Image (spheres, rainbow, N blue to C red):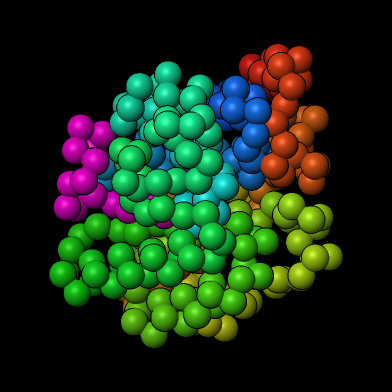
């Protein structure tokens, strides 16, 4: 399996830092949004959009592109930042997040935002859409891969496990699901609200190939994606152990930052913390 070059590691690391800056500014400007779970997936999103995925900002709908479904749609600020930095639309759009009559809604909208492959927001539904995309690719003998990002709290939705059965039944080897296991959801610790652990064993029981990684280690994530490409008879679930609010010490592992916007003063403080990290 290939390894990331030093240049790729540097690119992804620097871009993840930029995404975190963008996320904090987006949510502050909007005065609402979900910073915690957006920050926890910044490393993965940076890796996918700048190294792993076969995509073209000049042709967002090209038939052979890889697809990304943000099943945990409330983390849209992370994907919006990546799309803007990748050149899908002007970066100025980021500062209009959640504004009436503007392009970037609180959750991804495939009809109005270039680069969004599926509208999501109702938790549990995105992974089912990703299964449909993967099955279509399998039927068409297409080369594209489908990636889905779920939250660990989202796994409490029964539809997730219907999708898991479906994906294994149809041997959707072109589907890779990333589970952002940061341990927190809007009401508190996932283990206290409705314990979904052990996540890895559950996906194994449903017939998936399963890997467990540090979700902030880009080389470990890359190796997991490379391994998923070698699997030909089942979908792959990559369980990522992450820190909610990663990159902003005052937000890290704090459930209160699931869906709260920083004040302008906090924004300045948080941006400085990211810059100095």
**Res 225 seen here:** no
Query: Is 212 inside the magenta-drawn segment?
Result: no
User: Which of the pair 40/214 is nearer the observer?
Assistant: 40
Q: Main secondary structure of the magenta part?
A: loop
Q: Position of residue 62 (x, y in %)?
A: 17, 46
Q: Is residue 188 left or right of residue 118?
A: right
User: Which of the pair 228/261 is nearer the observer?
Assistant: 261
Q: Position of residue 18 (x, y in %)?
A: 52, 24
Query: Is 65 inside the magenta-drawn segment?
Result: yes
Determine the residue positioned at 53% across, 34% down. 98
Q: Is residue 11 left or right of residue 202?
A: left
Q: Is residue 152 left or right of residue 106?
A: right
Quarter of the figure that contains the C terminus: top right
Q: Position of residue 136 (x, y in %)?
A: 24, 70
Which of the 4 image quadrants contains residue 261? top right
Up-down: is 139 above or below 73?
below
Which of the 4 image quadrants contains residue 86? top left
User: Which of the pair 42/132 is nearer the observer?
Assistant: 132
Determine the residue positioned at 33% across, 70% down. 132
Q: Which residues are magenta?
A: 56-69
Up-down: is 195 above or below 170?
above
User: Which of the pair 83/98 is nearer the observer?
Assistant: 98
- Residue situated furthest front in the rendering: 101
Determine the residue positioned at 80% across, 65% down. 193
Quarter of the figure that contains the N terminus: bottom left
Q: Position of residue 248 (x, y in %)?
A: 72, 29
Up-down: is 224 above or below 78?
below
Q: Is residue 258 left or right of residue 240?
A: right
**Res 143 seen here:** yes
The number of numbered badges drawn on the structure is 0
Which of the 4 image quadrants contains residue 235? bottom left
């Amino acid at each position: 399996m290939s390894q990331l070059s030093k240049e790729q590691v540097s690119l992804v690391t620097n871009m993840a830092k930029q995404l975190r800056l963008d996320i904090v500014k987006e949510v502050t400007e909007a005065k609402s949004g979900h910073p915690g779970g957006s920050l926890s997936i910044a490393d993965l999103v940076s890796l996918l959009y700048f190294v792993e995925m076969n995509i073209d900002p000049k042709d967002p709908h090209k038939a052979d592109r890889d697809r990304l479904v943000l099943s945990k749609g409330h983390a849209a600020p992370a994907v919006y930042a990546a799309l803007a930095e990748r050149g899908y639309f002007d970066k100025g759009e980021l500062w209009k997040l959640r504004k009436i009559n503007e392009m970037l809604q609180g959750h991804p909208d495939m009809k109005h935002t270039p680069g969004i492959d599926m509208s999501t927001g109702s938790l549990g539904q995105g992974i089912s859409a990703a299964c449909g995309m993967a099955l279509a690719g399998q039927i068409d003998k297409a080369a594209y891969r489908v990636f889905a990002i779920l939250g660990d709290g989202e796994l409490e939705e029964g539809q997730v496990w219907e999708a898991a059965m479906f994906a294994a039944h149809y041997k959707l080897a072109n589907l890779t699901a990333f589970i952002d296991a940061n341990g927190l959801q809007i009401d508190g610790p996932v283990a206290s609200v409705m314990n979904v652990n052990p996540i890895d064993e559950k996906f194994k029981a449903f017939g998936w190939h399963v890997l467990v990684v540090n979700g902030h280690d880009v080389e470990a994530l890359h190796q997991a994606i490379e391994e998923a490409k070698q699997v030909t008879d089942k979908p792959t679930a990559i369980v990522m152990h992450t820190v909610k609010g990663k990159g902003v010490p005052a937000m890290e592992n704090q459930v209160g930052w699931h869906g709260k916007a920083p004040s302008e003063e906090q924004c300045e403080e948080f941006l400085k913390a990211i810059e100095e990290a």
